[in-house]
Image (cartoon, rainbow, N blue to C red):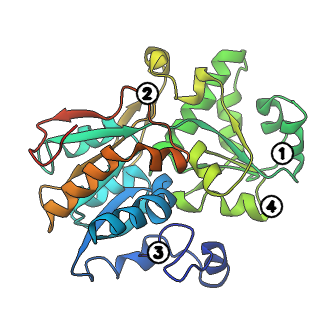
Amino acid sequence: MALGGDYDGDGVSRRTALATAGSLVGIGVAGCLGTATSSVRVLSAGSLAQTFESHIGPAFEDETGISVHGEYYGANAVMRMVEDRTKQPDVIVSADSTLLRDRLYGEFTDWDVEFATNSLGIGYNAETTFGQGLEDGIPWYELALETDDGELSIGDPDLDPLGYRAVQAFELAENEYGLEGFQDELLERVYEEPEEPQMMAGVESGSRAASVVYHNMAVDHEMPFFEFPDAYSFANPELADHYATVEFTTDEEGYTAEGRPILYNATVNDEADDPDAGHQLVQFLIDNPDLLVDAGLTVSESLPRPEGSLPEAIDV
């Protein structure tokens, strides 16, 4: 299994690797892709690194004999790499289903399947002042305004939906509680982490108090998680119109993302080297919701849900 989750193929903790070798996510994996004769290459949103490395990948290989070689980045970066052909994966997975359709439909695919949801909140270190305050019931937004610069982190909003959802959540919270200037002040204080799979490392070490992350990322690291209320957790499909009252525009592409419920989707690249293996992996995601739930994701009764011209190999 390629590096990219929290453990390498020898069972070594990725945290240990980080301490001695720096970031291996994306960089270390890149040289490994495509080396196996029976493998499927996945380019996925970074929040699913552990999901693929520790849950989906091993189970899929056990069932099919096909190994999963993954690279994990912010979903914006994933789409950019596909568009400029920096990467040529078999399977593409996004943490924002609309983002994938807006960016890849027409040239790289014409279908996808939504297979899981998630919720936004705060993964925190209980030994810090911020973490202790949360556990004492102090509102998170009051604690956030008292943090030192960089003590709270978010994803890079120009690279991944986790980042721009944090920005949008701050705006929705400002509106929810009448906190004038809250979003602007908080964005001046937070650290923007460019490597999404590394979001939790600083929190675990105590160098950061907390990070705005998805629920499954906290589960991956056995870390306390404070889930945001429905009004800005992006977890309630019934509040889609409410979430859509905020938006974020990326600097590089100028892509504008409205607030919307969190939905993971997957497709097979039209330029895939092994589309058959890709189809098998997408079908495996559809057929094994329990594995996704074990990884901290949510699979509602409305999922899986297809979109576009589904190939015959996919049965939803």
Residue in the image at 59% along x and 83% along y: 21
| Quadrant hosting residue 73 | bottom left
Front-most of residues 269 and 189: 269
- Report crowding for label 4: few under 14, some 14 to 19, many 20 or more residues within 10 A (C-alpha): some
Please tell me whether mark 4 sits on a helix, a strand or a loop. loop
Q: Nearer the viewer, residue 310 or 83?
A: 310
- Residue 25 to residue 48: above or below: below
- Crowd around label 1: few <14 · some 14–19 · many ≥20 (10 Å): many
Q: CA distance from mark 1 to mark 2?
A: 28 Å
Residue placed under numbered mark 4 in the picture: 206
**At numbered mark 3, what does the secondary structure look like: helix, strand or loop?**
loop
Name which residue type carries label 1: Gly
Quarter of the view holding residue 230: top right
In the image, which is nearer the foreground, mark 1 or mark 3? Answer: 3
On-image quarter of the N terminus: bottom left
Q: Secondary structure at mark 2?
A: loop
Q: Residue at x 8, y 44 (%)?
A: 312
Residue at x 90%, y 47% (from the top left corner): 129
Q: Which residue is mark 3?
A: 3
Q: Which residue is mark 1?
A: 131
Image spot of residue 267 (x, y percent): 23, 48
